[in-house]
Amino acid sequence: MNLLSVIAPGAIVFALAGIAVRIQYSLFRGFDFAVAFAVVLSAESFTSASGLFAGKPAVGVVACSGLGILVAILVVVGWNSAIHRLFSAHSKIGMALLVFSLGVSTAISGFVGLVRGPGLRQPIWSPNQTQILPSSIIGLPAIYAIVCGGAVVILVLLWASRRTGLALDLWAQNQDFAREIGIERSTLAPVTGVVTGLASGVVGCYFALAGGSTPEGGLSAFLYGAGAALLLPAPTLNATVLGGLILGTIYVIVQLIFNQSIADLILFAIVAYLLLRRGTSRTVQGAR
Amino acid sequence: MSFAANIIVVVTFFFACGAGSAFLQKRLNLTSIAHGAVFGTGAYVYAVTAMASGSALMGALAAFVASGLAGSALVLAAERVVGDDYALTSFAFQVVWLGLIANIRPIIGGVLGIPNIPSLIGNTKQGNPVLYFAAIGVVFAIFVALILRKIARSAFALSAAVVARSSELADTLGISSFATHAQVGIAYGVIVGLSGAVFGSFLTYIDPTLFSTDTSITILAIGFFGVVGGIRGTSLGAIIIVGIPELMRFLGSSMAQAGFAQMAFSGIALAAVAVWSLRSSKNPWAETK
């Protein structure tokens, strides 16, 4: 039970980060670091707002989480709209999007660091000490990830089988055909922004609750998500969630046995291996 | 005087790294986020070899070889992945490299790093060592600029341009894609790795935080200045992104504030270059409808 309460939050957080990265990838056909800064801003909002709820952790978690998620949703919806307008003349924007979003993410981390100073900032409560169930070690962060994160994962999977989710899937597979039946990036951008923002927001709030927020924390979330999105070859949300759950479980177990740095090392060795094995160069794919 | 010399040292070595990054971008159209790993490889190999052999020259030679190998390994990944997949792969390499460096305690000290690294200029009794390093930095930066200019005007640059555009066309013309990638990688690795070696020798102390993802992004941003504006652009990029935060530090800002300012400047530069690239006729990345 206790081991499960340690592994499950990690696995769910990886799945959520994977969902966010996969949706942005499907929309823009490129890796988008918007996930990174949405996580940072959500975590910082959560931590800052926690000061208003000293002594009321239960109410505080709900209110601060709502604020954090709202901030992430607004940021990603605005970002998707801006990217669509900025790059509307181009159908393939992968590299430019990666560099642009990496730049914006780095600049936001820099400005956040300049405004609030370096290091970890934790919510005003001592979250890891807050036990909900007597005689168990399940703390508030684990409960939050399992209940809130799990609910969001299920909601997103349900959304993926509905009209907009299917439209995004078609858009990701064949843009020309999608356009022929009236699906445009401009109509998908706001809805996908809400879903990405929701997933990133929950990840940010979990980060804030579990270990505190740092200006650079978003990059880790993005890389966890990229790993989850790439682990299984099928480019669908279901595969991404499964990839996230598998990768998250491996990550937490390695972290428990060794440390976070070795867990990162193994995780990104897997990501690099997967990318190199699949290959995208013309030489590997034999395209002419 | 020491303050100014210190800024010159940092700016000149980051200029050289930025020029290496721009070289990679211009010749093979590769955007790497693992510059910190190559920079760090040079610094670590220099430190370990110089301390073990007692000779700074041996350290520099070992750094030369190791960073050339590291650079070519990094660039040869482009034989399999290109575009944003290459950038993400290099990012993963950077994190793996950092994880390795932070967890190997014997010889390289893990997260504690390596102290008391022998200086390249020895124990100078006369004059300020910072001034010597400033002079070395200026000479090294000029040397790198001249070498890269010579390469840009050579037949090799044309071969690399063909490989970057189409490996099939390169095959047809008898140009080896593998050899070209390896050669560009060696040149890039030597420039960036040697900068790291001399920088480590200047600091006399290195640890993994000096070669983090932030360092890679800083070098990448300076490199983009070089892609847009050549050598002058690289110089301007190094002054803005590294020189101004260093100046802030000497004017009383904390190390952390200077670091965050550097992150903010790097980020703004990257975003601006991405927007410029899509609007420019020289855009290497986007395919229009």
Image (spheres, coloured by chain):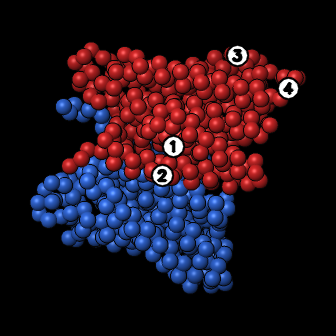
Chain colours: A blue, B red
Helix, strand or loop status at disc 1: helix
Q: In this view, does B47 lie above or below A64?
A: above
Q: Is residue B104 above or below residue A106?
A: above
Labels 3, 1: front one: 1
Q: Is residue A222 above or below residue A48?
A: above
Residue B221 numbered tag: 1
Q: Are marks 1 and 2 in contact (CB under 8 Å)?
A: yes
- B216 vs B110, left or right, is left
Instruction: Give the quadrant of residue A214.
Output: bottom right
Question: Disc 4 versus disc 3: distance between alpha carbons?
Answer: 21 Å
Residue B57 numbered tag: 3
User: Same chain, marks 1 and 2?
Assistant: no
Residue underneath mark 2: A103
Q: Which of marks 4 and 3 is nearer the N terminus?
A: 3
- Dot 3: within a 10 Å radius of its alpha carbon, few (fewer than 14), some, or many (20 or more) residues? some
Question: Disc 1 versus disc 4: distance between alpha carbons?
Answer: 35 Å
Labels 2, 4: front one: 4
Q: Position of residue B253 (x, y in %)?
A: 73, 54
Q: Residue at x 51, y 37 (%)?
A: B233
Residue underneath mark 4: B127
B2 or A254: nearer the eye? B2
Question: Quarter of the image containing the C terminus of chain A?
Answer: top left
User: Same chain, marks 3 and 2?
Assistant: no
Q: Position of residue B75 (x, y in %)?
A: 43, 29
Helix, strand or loop status at disc 2: helix
Q: Earlier in the sequence, mark 1 or mark 4?
A: 4
- Dot 2: within a 10 Å radius of its alpha carbon, few (fewer than 14), some, or many (20 or more) residues? many
Q: What subunit carries mark 2?
A: A
Question: Disc 3 versus disc 2: distance between alpha carbons?
Answer: 38 Å
Q: Do the residues labelled 3 and 1 touch (CB within 8 Å)?
A: no
What amino acid type is highlighted by mark number 1? Ala
What amino acid type is highlighted by mark number 3? Leu
